[in-house]
Amino acid sequence: MSRATILSAILSNQPQTTQLPEDLQFDCPAKAAVTEKFIQMINLIGGRVVEIQRIEDINLYATAHYGAGERLITPIEELDFYTQFAGDEDPHQFENIAFAVFKTHFAVAENGAVWITEDRMGARVLPFICQHLGMLVFEDSIVSNMHEAYQLIGSQDYGFGTFIAGPSKTADIEQSLVLGAHGARSIIIFLLKKEL
């Protein structure tokens, strides 16, 4: 059988196309259940949630967990360790960052991921090179699933953006899980609770 005959047979044996629904909807739980699901997922993937009432509460966490000699960095102006970025920093200067904190755009309950774009990173390398990672999540910004997440970012204009879920992790064929193997060793989600 010739190559042309085989390719022709494949081309003529295609399944019929099926149109997707115009308005694809998914069940979304109540907002309180979304927050609970997000917290459960963060704990499941190796992270930790610290509930705060105001952004400045992150300063208390940093003081309690990091010593005077350790390098802390953040592009969040409300924090004591705020760092101004010019935008042309050499990534090598961030090699010894103990703790970095960033403000996220939103979080996803179904997998514990947070969405952040480069304009909130200070330097693109920071979330991936720091020893310990902090992410500020506003409770009102948590969405149920990735379908909602992609609806939010589908029409946005950004240069670089990424979903980050939990600390860095890897596992080998023997199913030995290692956290912090090639990136942040831990992740703390600072969950800013909405006022009642």
Image (tube, rainbow, N blue to C red):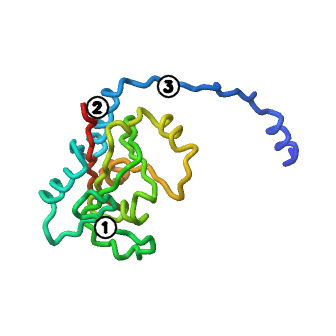
Q: Is residue 170 left or right of residue 54?
A: right
Question: Which residue position is annotated with label 1?
Answer: 83
Residue drawn at point x = 39 percent, y = 46 percent: 114
Question: Which residue position is annotated with label 3?
Answer: 26
Q: Position of residue 31 (x, y in %)?
A: 35, 28
Inspect the image, locate mark 1, and give the three-letter code of the amino acid beneath it: Thr
Residue drawn at point x = 28 percent, y = 64 percent: 82
Query: Is residue 20 depicted above or below 76 in this figure?
Result: above
Q: CA distance from mark 1 to mark 3?
A: 41 Å
Inspect the image, locate mark 3, and give the three-letter code of the amino acid beneath it: Phe
Pointer 2 local density, CA inside 10 Å: few below 14, some 14–19, many at least 20: few
Pointer 1 local density, CA inside 10 Å: few below 14, some 14–19, many at least 20: some
Label 2 or label 3, whichever comes before in sequence order: 3
Label 1 or label 3, whichever comes before in sequence order: 3
Helix, strand or loop at label 2? It is: helix
Q: CA distance from mark 2 to mark 3?
A: 18 Å
Question: Which residue position is annotated with label 2?
Answer: 36
Q: Quadrant of the C terminus?
A: top left
Query: Could you say which disc has been placed on residue 20 in the image?
Result: none
Q: Quadrant of the N terminus?
A: top right
Quadrant in the picture for residue 45: top left
Residue drawn at point x = 28 percent, y = 54 percent: 134
Q: Given contact means CB atoms under 8 Å apart, are the residues at marks 2 and 1 in contact?
A: no
